[in-house]
Amino acid sequence: MNLVSKLVRYFSTTLMLSISTTIVCRAQQEAMFTQYMFNGLAINPAYAGSHQTLEFTALAREQWTGLEGAPSTQTFTAHSPLKNRSIGLGLSVINDKIGVTNQFGVYGSYSYRIQFQNKGVLSMGLQAGFTQYNEDLTQLQGSIRDPNDPNFSQDEVSKFMPNFGAGLYYYTKRFYTGLSSPHLVQNKLDNLEAAYQEARQRRHYFFTTGYVFDLSRSVKFKPNLLIKVVEGAPVEADINLNFLFQEILWAGVSYRSFDSFDVILQVNLTEQFSIGYAYDFATTTELKRLHSGSHELMLNYRLKPPRRRMLTPRYF
């Protein structure tokens, strides 16, 4: 079977699986990432410990630059397998600000992995932690903020929201696929009885998959797909095509439905350290008039295993 036939079969199967799991949804609340394929723990706790050593990833995203109140997100993740190679632990810290709202979350992850002989690894993950939600209504202009509106009866809204999530992740040296829901509890966003009755955290469901093809001895091709489903919003698809040159430079493009075209670059500066950058272009003239695109910077560092053993190349 040639490369084109493999790709057609791969994407047609993936899209059919995604369509068959569509759920009726309500609102997008989880932070958005363009480099999700290199930052798996941010959306799936089962990713914890999937690499052979302790790994740190920091990511900063400035979305829709030039638009006042646009989303600004910073994340830090760390994960590692334990000496018992079947168990992995992880930590995720996220700060997400949009408009007058700010969410700060800390979550710990646990994964248990089952190794299938010569086939791959199935990882089952859980995460638990909290999100601190804050809303500063004093930042709104007087013409917008109506004192008679019960939604504005408080100057500030603050809520501590414990939560937990779960995920599945299957991977080989060349293929991965995952299904996750990072926050399963639909917390109410404030303590009022009349206002905000429908303002709740909504469950988000993520389906991811990707495969690495050899185009030549020095070039690899990795398509990735992310499907995001949330109550009350259209199903969102992120289709990505990445090329790896000489095991050093990743270069790729993505399309995110209803939002943007994206360009991704990542450089493996050393065996342990890499840096990645993504830029999102708005897909419509109307969106281009409102903002000048989105920027995303990612840093990744992996500790060298004991006895200075060589790190196995990781493609996801």
Image (tube, helix red, strand yellow):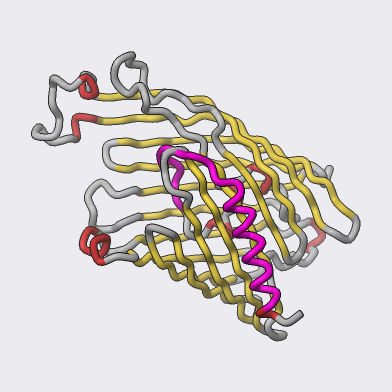
Q: Closest to the observer: 211 or 295?
A: 211
Q: Can residue 81 be found in the magenta stretch? A: no
**Residue extending furthest toward the top:** 193
Could you tell me if residue 123 is visible in this image?
Answer: yes
Q: Which image quarter: residue 301?
A: bottom right
**Horizontal and vertical percent position of residue 3:** 69, 80
Residue at (25, 66) in percent of width and height: 285
Could you tell me if residue 316 is visible in this image?
Answer: no
**Horizontal and vertical percent position of residue 113:** 79, 45
Residue at (68, 55) in percent of width and height: 177
**Height in image: 136 above or below 58?**
above
**Horizontal and vertical percent position of residue 173:** 76, 64
Magenta stretch?
5-32
104 on left or right of 219: left
Q: Quadrant of the N terminus?
A: bottom right
Q: Can residue 30 be found in the magenta stretch? A: yes
Residue at (42, 44) in percent of width and height: 233
